Each structure stands twice: as structure tokens, then as C-alpha cells.
Image (cartoon, coloured by chain):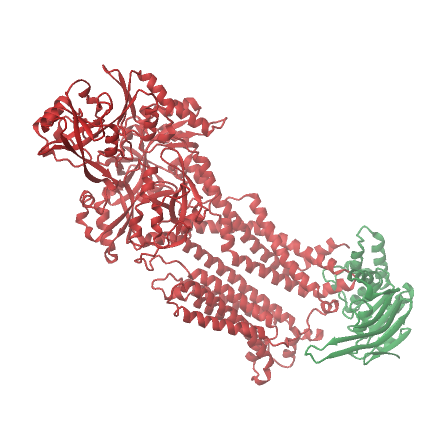
Amino acid sequence: MLLELKNISKTYEIPSGEGQAIVLRDISLQVNQGESIAVVGPSGSGKSTLLNIIGALDRPTSGIVTLTGKNLADLEDSELSKIRNQDIGFVFQLHHLLPQCTVLENVLIPTIPLGLNREDENVRIRAKELLEKVGLEKHFYHFPAQLSGGERQRVAVVRALINTPKLILADEPTGSLDRESSENLGQLLLQLNKEEGMALIVVTHSLELARLMDKVYKLRDGKLENS
Amino acid sequence: MNPWKLLLRSLAFYRKSHLWVVLGTMVSTAILVGALVIGDSVRHSLQKVVLDRLGTTEYALSSGDRFFQARMADDLSNTLGTIVAPLLQTKGIAIAEGGQRRINNIQVIGVDARFGEIGGDRDFFSQILPDEAIVNQYLATRLEIKEDDEIVLRMQELDVMPKDAPLSMDSESTIARRFKVKAIASDSGFGRFNLKADQVSPSTVFVSLPALSQDMGFERRANVLLISERPGTPLDIQVVNKAVKDVWTLVDAGLELREITGRNFVELKSSRVFLDPSVVDAAVNLSQKARPILTYFVNEIQLRNRSTPYSFVSAPGTPIIPSGMNDDEIVINAWLARDLDARVGDQIQMIYYVLGPRRDLKELSSEFRVAAVVPLRGIYADKDLLPDFPGLSGEENCRDWNPGMPIDLDKIRDKDEDYWDDFRGTPKAFVTLRAAQKMWANRFGNLTAVRYSGLKKDVVESNFKEALDPASLGFVFREVKKEGLRASSQSVNFSQLFLGLSFFIIIAALLLTSLLFAFSTENRSEENGLFLALGFSRKAVRRLVLREGAVLVMIGSLLGSFMGLMYNLLILNALKTVWQGAVGTSALHIHFELSSLFMGAFSGIIVALFTIWLVTRRQIAHSISGLQRGLTKIEARGKKKPRKSLFIGISCVMAVVFILVLTNFGRGEDAFAFFFTAGSLLLVSGMTLTNVVLFRLGKSTNRMRLGLLNIGVRNTARKRMRSVTLIGLLACGLFIVFTVGANRINAFKDAERRDSGTGGFALYGESAIPVLYDLNSKKGIQFYGLERGDAENMSFVQFRVKEGDDASCLNLNRVANPQLIGVDPDELSKRGAFTFTAITDEVNPEDPWSVLEQDLSDKTIPVIADQSVIVWGLGKAVGDTLNYLDEKGEAFQLKLVGGLANSIFQGNIILSERAFIQNFPSISGYRLFLVDAPFEKIEEVSGGLSWAMQDQGLDLVPASTRLAEFNAVQNTYLSIFLILGSFGLLLGSVGLGIVVWRNIKERLGELALLRAVGYTRKSVRTIILSEHLALLIAGIFYGILAALLATLPSLLTPGAEIPYLTILIVLIIVGLNGAIWTYLAAFFATKEDLIPALRKE
């Protein structure tokens, strides 16, 4: 098993001092290698919070997250960073590309913590191959500002794949795209999921995108339900 | 891809925002480098002054009123293998334009080509004709003269016999000569020549050495020797002083050894009449055959109703004095016995003058029993017993006598004239040496001759030379170059000073750098969030940000270093012109050490990096998701009531009221310190109560009427700490700048009070020529013609002066030989003059001046000085000791027992006249005066006195003016602080603009919403402006209110030097500048279309 969530809860202090807001309640989930999952739910239902907890960006108030057999709660900040870098690939609603870097460079950003340098041609070749795979072969040396929204998001997807992670987390990946681009991106994610063999968890509003996944879960009142 | 490439990409992409960080670092580095380089420049300039004023001189000897033969220079030059220049130096008064321009206290120096050689231009000082003079640039400027103009010099007449010595002449103490100005000696052309460690050029006239020595009656003599550096092998001071010991002769010391023909003895005499104690020691201990002699001039010898006027009486020892004769017995010659009708056993009375301080003549008498009457022949008719009394021994007739004491020539009878004709000054009576010394010994000596029977002159001479150390007569070289360079290297530390004065700009620039960097980092918080999300550790992200900051900071520091040099030029120019009061010289040149440049740049980098590190540390510590959202969430309002702030605020207000009442609203004693405290407390209360008000404001919005201004003002409550910090920074800045800037010292306040810095004296005077008499005495008033002035309304306190380095704040060098002044402490004690800020245990607080007359247990001499001289001029503290050399070249210790509060004595060390005379017996007369006179007649008195004593070159200034000159230094520093602090404030107000920008950027969504619901762009700006201008106004209000309170005592002082205009201008500029930056920030931040920001929300 690649990922296991056991009784995950997340609460926040209400700033005005009027108690606590419960975002996630007792969530358990198991994800296997190569599996694709969609989590749907209304705004504010805690989808992104759940994704952040899975992605080691946030810690649960209670419960255990196990990724590749490691309990994330037991890990130091630096070890969590390593997991985020090598085991997880993130795709955000907003692409979060660095405007100062070219497309190729953006893709290669996650390789910096690995200490790979530009002499390591294999990484560059892989980056280029992935970019070609998503149809961006003509844009290696373009800057994000020179790309369309869909293209930027595809760069973000390739960036998530560059370190061959075991799990891709996509937070509303089509949220800022038009319909056509959304469909293309959905197909692309699925294709890569199959081809690269990594698990995929997508948090989305889009039922069309959700339906493309192996399993669909619904997050309601902080609880995760099978859809 | 690697971190460096990423770094380069980021630097290039964010170059616009980076530019501001670079600029901020540049400014702070420039100030740091500038301050350090100013230190280098001042130190280097002072070192240059040392080289300018000394040329290649390495050692100098100044023998004062002992005039050695100029050939000594040749002998030394041959022995040491370097140039040795003899000079004849005296003081004088320079007069130009027929008396319209007059400069007192100048140095007149007789020079020849050798002096020019030491100065680097042999020809310039060679062949000065007897009626020609070379004037130095400083004096030429002051006198407004040029080449070929004519000047008159009134010079102090040099005399081997100290003016305070008994029977020395008091008349004709100056000679006047007319000169044509041959050339003007520039500062770099040795015109600055000065043996004192001072950056201020002296006023000097160079004349021909042969001509001056002839005018002074000391042909081919000199009183100063300069030894040039020896090329190749440097000279050692011990070698130099050993050479002096080898080459000096008795003639150089004013001594004469002569064989008395036919009598088989050799006699040692001095042209100073009295033999110096060190000479006596050497001479008497030379041989058992030495016979000490003391001969004196008596006014009258009486027996019953008969008297003989004006005779010489001697103590010649055996065989003239029979062995076993008592001290109250006298041997008289037959002439006197006849004149008085005296016989053995008669009791005769001898009346004579002794000379006290201030040439205070006392007529004393002693009684003697006639032990023997001896014939006027043989050993009893010894004309040679008469020393060379000036005005007596050389005269043809008794009626031509003109000694330095009053004689009634009418008393001289024909038979007295006959005696003079036949026997000259042959003593008429003889007493024992002990009796003679009891009556006539004085500080100049207790013998007038030493005789050696049966010894050859050359044997005596060589033995005597061996026995006497010429250093004891002042023939000792000083390492003037070494001392000068040491004094300049330990000079006032301008680096530290300007770092302190620029404190505010540095803080403001750093604040700006941190704000700009924080702003830039915040804008890129999403990027940092992304890095974290992509698996960069926090450390790695921090390193990325810091690395970028480091590059910016390094670029900024590099540019700042160059800008620092420019800043340094600007400051140096200001110090040479508008701020000259702080340094007293325009001889400042830019100079920098690479180490200073490196240190400044390095400090700039470290400080800026630290600032950036603080910012980065805080920002990267946010949650990853928070960073990814761009930290735009609305900050929660503190729910906790600021009770602590309320308590502190109210306590401070109560303390302020208490202080006001305690000090009688600024009229009480020590009001200055109390009010500064009160001002500070008010500032604290302002800050804390603002926190409370903002809290209330944030809570009570529903009771307020909604309006654009209200919304703005209410917004200030949202980030309370940021608002309070902003107000606090602005207020503290204004407070410190204004309180320090406005607290100038006012010399004119309470100038009439005895406990003030003037000691309550109306005038302060210094004379070029020593004043010999007590100006309060009838004799003094008559002698100097003061009866024409307002003599009855004046009284004087007179000081003897041992010239030395100026230890006041006007001299930037760290002096080792400060000027000593000797006074009768009772004069100051009875007036209760001046205030002491620090005293040692030896001092009686009720009568502090009396300590000067105390004999301290550790054998040191108690001295008092101005506290600022002790701390800054000497680098000492009260209780410390100073080493000094007395006239004989022997070391003695001065103990600083008291420090005076800011006084006119800056630059001097005060000791008792008794101790002064003990250590410097040859220094005659008084050259420093404090004058009590009616303050309303100050100009009249000053004018009359200056006129009466113009031949003495008396320079008089109101004591308060003198004090103001010293205060000007401190006041100039305060002005510099005010100006630099104001620049810091301006820079700080730019920071306000950045805060506005940052606030707006944080709330773009909220502002967009306002736009979306129909607010015009103008309305949005009004809200922003009202919020931030409220902070600006509050900051200025608190700062000014607190500063006003802190400086209230100064404000209430009549004639206080408050720079109102400067303060007002600074205030307006700071206010306007803040408003403009706020407006610009609001304008540009809202210029873009705000609606897209809504999407992000």
C-alpha cells in the first residue's frame, strides 16, 4: 500500500475565541500504487486541507498518515521535505510557475534539492521528454508569461513528474482553465498516471474530471464518503 | 538547473524591486564607510599638519630664557651628521596699517637657511635682510597683508635674568621694529612651523636670526635647536642628548669661569646673577676648595641716627669672615665704620628689599653686631665680589643707577659717588653665608658666585662640565615628531563620533532596507511556499532567499563604499566651512585606509544581511499553505485587552505631572535632567495609550458614524502593533533629534554667577608679554597706566603660564604636555568661583580650591582642570596622575584632584602659584587674567584695559564669549546631529511610504471589493491616506510634544540658543515628505485595476 490515512481529524481555532472549527472528522483512506482517486465536495468542505495533510504540507490534529510505510508524524521537517520532493508531485490550481525561469527550468526546479546539476544530462533529457509528451516541445525556452493558462498548467504537471514521484496530488488542477483545456489536462493526468505508474489523487469540483478516476470520494461535513 | 542559475534568474527578473534594497544598503554602507573614512581623513590630516609644522624636524630643544651660542648647532651637526638649525624665538605683537590691525600673541622666530632646509626649501628662508620678515599665511590673512607691505613688530625683549628675580629690570620689556614683508610662507612651505601639537596654525613672523639676536643683545645666540631626521641611520634620543652633553660650554649656559689675576683663584658667575640650584650643586660639590658667595644690594645701613645708603653686602666666607663668626655678626670696612661712626660691638641695622611674587617689594631689616672693622684694602677691597647686577654694576655714576627696584637717587651723597669712583661695587660689609642666604635667598638661587682657590681654570671647567647635566638647565631635546604623530594618532576619534552622529541615518537606512526586503520577500511568498511544497527544506529556502539578499547587499555595499567616499568629501567640506567650529581648521584632506573601506563595507554587509536574515526567518516560518496563498489573509484582531499598556501609560502620565510639580514647572534646580526624563515618559505614555485607543477604536466601530475618513482611521486599529511601531519610530526619531539638537549650551546664561562656567568674571585676557606686577596693587595700576581706566571697579586674578599644548576641545590631538597655569587658589576660593563636577577625597567640598595648597601624601602636586579637558583632551579621569618635566628636566607628577564643569579653563591645568614657581622658577610674570568688572561696563572696561596694556599685547574677551567659543564645538556637533538626524528622519519617512504600499498590497482584495461595490478610486485613496496620515500626524505630534516637554527648561531660558527655524523647517520637510510618500504609495498601489485581486480572495 502506498498511502494510508487512519482516523484523520483537523480542527482550527476560531480567531474570535469562540471555540474550534472541525474541518476533517475521522477520515480513513487507503491508496495503492497506480491507483487514481478523486475527492469532490463543496467549497470549504476541507478538500484542500485533506490534500495538504496527505502532501505533508500540513499536519493533522489527530490520526496517522502513512506514506510508503512511513508515519509522517514521526518525521522531522527535513525528512518531510525530502518526501515532498521525491515521493510526491504537486499540481496546484494556480500553476505557481516561477516567472523568472524558462519552462525547462521550471520543470527542473524540484531537482535542485537533489543536488543534481546541469551536467546531469539525464534529468534534462527526461524533462524534455516529458514536455514533449505534453505537447510543449516548442516551448522549452519560453517564459511562463509567454504561455497560455492550459500550457502553464501542463508545465506544472511535468514539474510534478520530474522526480518520478510515487504519488501525484492535484488540487483543483483545472480550476483556472477553460473547458477544453480542463478536458485535455484531465486526460493528460490520467495518461501519465497509467504510463508512469504513480498514484493520483485529484481534489476537484469538476465531476467530469472526477469521473475519469478509478475511485471517487465525496467530502461532506468533514467526512469522506464513497461516491 | 541549479541554485546559482536560479539566483541569477531571480536577480534579473526582480531587478526593479531589488534596486531599492540595493539603494537602502548603499545608503547605510555609505554612512558607515563615510564615518570611518572621516576618521582616517582627520587622522591623516592631523599627521600631515605634524609634518607641515615640523618639516623634517625630529628632535627639538627649547631653552627658553637661556641663550646658547649658535655654534652649538654646528657642533651638534658635525657630531650627529644631520642638519641642526638654531632659532631665536620670542613672542610679540604684529601691527599693520599704522596700528589699525593688530594681532597679539604671535611667535617671532629668527631663522637662517638651515631652518629652510629642514622645512624643505633652503632658499626661501635664507638671506632675509635685517629689515625683512617672512609672514606665515595664517597671520598674513589675519593681518590682511601681502608681500612688500610693511608691518611693525613689538617683540618681547629677551633677557637672561628672569623678570621676577631680585634686581632685574622691569622697564623696556619690549622692542619695536619695522619690517618689510619679504614673502608669505604657506602652510606647506613651513609657514605652519610650531613645536606645539595643535592643528590650528600659529601666527608667526620669521626674521633674520643674526639681526634678531643682535636686536635682542644676544649676538649669535639662539634659544631653540631643531635636529633634522638623519638620512640613513635614524638618530636615537639618547645619542642626541649625549651629544648635547659633549658640545655644550659654560658660555651656552650663561656661566662664566674666570681667573682672578693675582689672587690665585677661579670664580664661577652667572649672567643671571643668581646661580641656579643645579649649578650650585655641581659647583660646590666639585672641590673642597669651593667657596660659595652671596652678594646683595641693600638700601640702607643704619646706626643710631646715621645711615649709609645703597651699598653692597657680601657673604664671601673665609678668610674675610673670621672663622667662628656668628650669623648675627657683621664685618664692616673702615669706610662704612667711619661713615656710621661704628665700632666693634655696635648694633647696626641693615635695610633691604626682597621681591615677592608679582614683584611685590618688601622692605625688610636685619640687625647685626659689628664683629670687626677691616681696612679697605687687600682681600677686603674685592670689587669682583659684585655680581653683574643690571642697571648697577655697569654704570659710571651712582646717579645713573637704574636697578629693578625703586631707589631714591637724592639720598646718594658725594662721598657715595666717590666710593663708587674709587672702589666701584666693593662690598662695605660682610656677613656669614647662612645669614646672607636667610635674608636674600630666592627661587632663582642662593649664591652669586663660587670661588676655587688654587685650582686651574681648565681643570675646574672640565670637572664642572662633567658634574653638571645640561638637561637641568633645560638643554634637553624632545622627540617632537614622535610626540606629534602620537598626539595625532590618538586624536579625537572622528570615526566613532560620526558613527554616533549618523546613528539615525544608519538606523533609517537599515529600516528601509529591511522594509524593502520584507516587502519584496512578501511579494514572493508564494514562490517560497512553492519551493517548500516541492520539497525544498526551510533551510534550503532560507538559503536561497539569503543568497539573493547577500548578492544585493554586496552590490549595495560595494556601491555604498564609493558613495561613502563622496559622503566623506561632503562632510569634510562641511567641516572645513559651515562646521569648522568643530575642528577649528580647514587643513582637512580626504584620505582612506583600505581597512576602513573594507571594514565599512563589511559592516554594511553584515548589518544589512542580519536585517534580511531577521526578515527571512520570520517569513519562511509561516505555514506552507499560508505562504502559497501569499499571506493575504486578514490578520486576526487581538482580543486581549491591552491592560499592561493602559497601566504603563497612566503611570507615565502621573510621573510626568509629578516631575512638573517637583521642578516647579521648569524653574527648579536640575530641571534639565528631570525634564528630559519627563519627555521620555510622555513619549512612552503616548505609545502605550495609542495602543489602548486603537484597541478601543477597533472594538467600537458600530458606534461610529461610517465615513471615508472614519474607515481609514479605523483601519489603523487592524494592525495595532504595526501602527504603534510606526508612530513610535517617527516620534522617537523626532524626540531624539530635537532634544539633542535643541539642548545647546548657552554660555551667556548666568554668566554673572560665580558658579557658572565664567566663574562670574567679566573678562578673560591673555598677554603676549608677561605682566610683572600685581594689577590690583597701586604699583601695578601705576606701572601699566590703569588709573586712566576704571581701575577702582576692576579686580584681577592673575595666572602664571607654562606654555604647552592646548588641551581644550579646540585641539583635536591627544595632548601629552598641556599648558599649566599657576594661581593663588585663595583668589578663586574667596570668590567661590566655578563649579566642580568631580573631586577626589583630598578635596574639601566646602572649599575645593584650597586643595591646591595641600601637600599630598603621595608627593604629587594637586591640580584642577576642566572636566572635558581631563576626559577628552587628556584621556584621563579625576584621581589620575600626569607626568610632567620641570624646568630642570626632572619628572614630577600632577594629580588631577578636581574637574570643573564646562568652564573657561578649557585647555589648561591649574595648580597653585607656589607649586608653579617651585617647578618653573624661571618663568616670570603673568600672562593669563580673569577680570572682575561691572558687566554693564564690560566694553568700556575692556577697551580701556586693552589700550593701557597694548604693549603687553593683552587680548581681552568677555569671559562668556570665551566660554561660547568652547561651547561652539559642542554646539556644532549638536548641529551636525540635528542635520544628519533630520536626513535620517527623511529617510525614515520614505519608510512610511513603503509601509503604506505594503499595507495596500496586503489588502488589495479588500480595496478591490470597495471598488467593486462602487467606491471611486479617489474614495479608496482617501481611506488609505486618512489611515496613514493619521499615523504620521500622531508620530509627529507625540515626538514634538515629548521633545517640547524635555527641552522646556532650555526654552524658558532667556537667550537660549534654540534652533527654532531649523527645527521648523525639518518638521515641515518631514511632514511633507511623509505625506508625499504616503500619497505616492497610495496612488501607485491603487492605479492598477484592483478587480483581479478579488479573484485571488
The residue depicted at 90 percent of the width and 75 percent of the height is A215
Specify whether B1004 is left or right of B931: right
Q: Is residue B561 above or below residue B1092?
A: above
Q: How many marks?
A: 0
Q: Is residue B83 above or below residue B1068?
A: above
Specify whether B516 is left or right of B1033: right
Nearest the camera: B536 or B675?
B675
Chain A shade in the render: green
Chain B shade in the render: red
Nearest the camera: A203 or B1041?
B1041
Residue at the top extreme of this rendering: B262
Q: Is residue A190 above or below residue B268?
A: below
Q: State the quadrant of the N terminus of chain B.
A: bottom right
Residue B235 percent across, percent down from the top left? 47, 28
Picture quadrant where residue A9 is located: bottom right
Q: Is residue B156 visible?
A: yes
Specify whether B214 is left or right of B994: left
Residue B735 percent across, percent down from the top left? 48, 65
Q: State the quadrant of the C terminus of chain B.
A: bottom right
Nearest the camera: B897 or B905?
B897
